[in-house]
Amino acid sequence: MEAPSTALFTDQYELTMLRAALADGTAHRRAVFEVFARRLPNGRRYGVVAGTGRLLEAIQRFRFDAETLSFLRVKKIVDDTTADWLASYRFRGNIWGYAEGECYFPGSPILVVEGTFAEAVLLETLSLSILNHDSAIASAASRMTAAAGRRPIVEMGSRRTHEEAAVAAARAAYIAGFATTSNLAAGRRYGLPTGGTSAHAFTLLFDSEKEAFIAQVGALGRSTTLLVDTFDVREAVRTAVDIAGPELGAVRIDSGDLAVLAHDVRAELDALGATDTRILVSGDLDEYAIASLTAAPVDVYGVGTSLVTGSGFPTAELVYKLVARSTGTRPDAPLVGVAKRSTGKPTHKGRKWARRQLEDGVAVTEVVSTQPDCDLDGRQLLVPLIRAGEVVGQEPLLAARERHERSRAELPRTALQLSRGEPVLPTMYGAVEGMVGNGG
């Protein structure tokens, strides 16, 4: 099936700015835009970049076909000159960014877009809608997987968000370490491992819980997961083992005092000889609930609502700002830095490069500089994503997942604390503009 155009996933003012800039010729000035966060969500210590792969695919489909242009003309959003220019639109510039899965901090230039003003300004809304959503989900998911340690987490939030947001959330969660997803569209589209067995409705369909368990084990085998909290948990566990035997794969508890029930269920399973049967707990879990269950005999967590809503912060608060533009339309016209001075919303002028300085393998500073050949030590963070309009930065999802594990591992240990705090790395703007922290 041919993928639809993403051209109208934008705000109208992108096109009205284009129209005005085309009219006076400034549309063809070279421009540099950057995506960054002025601050992290309140109390968060780091963020996680996600959505880059989706954005690259979306930019490739950012095309203004005849039907789209007809809509824009009828609504008088564009004039004939602008419509003619849009008819052949292709982003032919360059994009760099933090690789997907990388951790970021206030001021980190996680995306750098360079091209003419006309072609680059149109990508603002698309870039922000994808990166803000996916990075928010990945940032929350990273806190959850850190709290879970070696215990896997299953993503099951599809029913709590928009159908397409659910697919994107499953992808972002996988980057941050989630083991599987219940969402089959995400499984098909991104190759994610999927899982799922039954809900309470299945148990209630039968005349007894025993009949429901017999049917499920008969169809799915002894390795299935039986939901044991529809009626009496302890009685359900005994029934489950009686039907499936000690080879029963897992039981799931979805309500009640999960810590107490997990201990009771573990004791019951062990007494019945089902020592290898795992316990999966779900039911409005977030990173704090997961952390509170570390001492309980839980084998797997299931997380839904908190994951797809960013655990209270459904946006990463990223912005897309012009930081440099040429003094004219000639290809050799020099770039000059530009910045806002708005109260509470300042920006830092100039195209940026970024490095992460480490000491003994532990990250200590995020250095952002306007000097590309600076003699700073540290790991380079910006990688090429698009060169002269051609995508060069697409990669397997597993690479982003492994990168996140490495990136999080190099942060100070305080990064994994769930109590509110400042970002664990200060962001330093070279030797010129000083330091920027949570309010920079």
Image: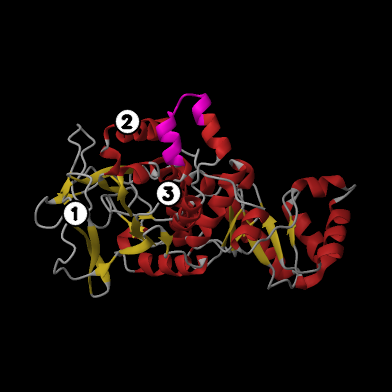
- Segment colored magenta: 72-86
Give the residue pinned by disc 3.
131
Of the two numbered discs 1 and 2 on the same chain, state the one appearing first in sequence. 2
Question: Is 378 left or right of 278, judged from the image as shown?
Answer: left
Total labels drawn: 3
Q: Secondary structure at mark 2?
A: helix
Q: Nearer the viewer, mark 3 or mark 1?
A: 1
Percent of width and height locating residue 209? 84, 52
- Magenta segment, principal secondary structure? helix
Front residue of 208/260: it is 208
**The C terminus sits in image quarter:** top left
Question: Is 291 left or right of 107, judged from the image as shown?
Answer: right
Report how far apart the C-alphas of labels 1 and 2 lie in the structure.
Answer: 24 Å
Question: Is 125 left or right of 412, judged from the image as shown?
Answer: right
Give the residue pinned by disc 1.
332
Q: Amino acid at mark 2?
A: Ala
Percent of width and height locating residue 216? 83, 59
Q: Amino acid at mark 1?
A: Asp
Q: Is residue 386 above or below residue 330?
A: below
Q: Amino acid at mark 3?
A: Leu
Give the residue pinned by disc 2.
20
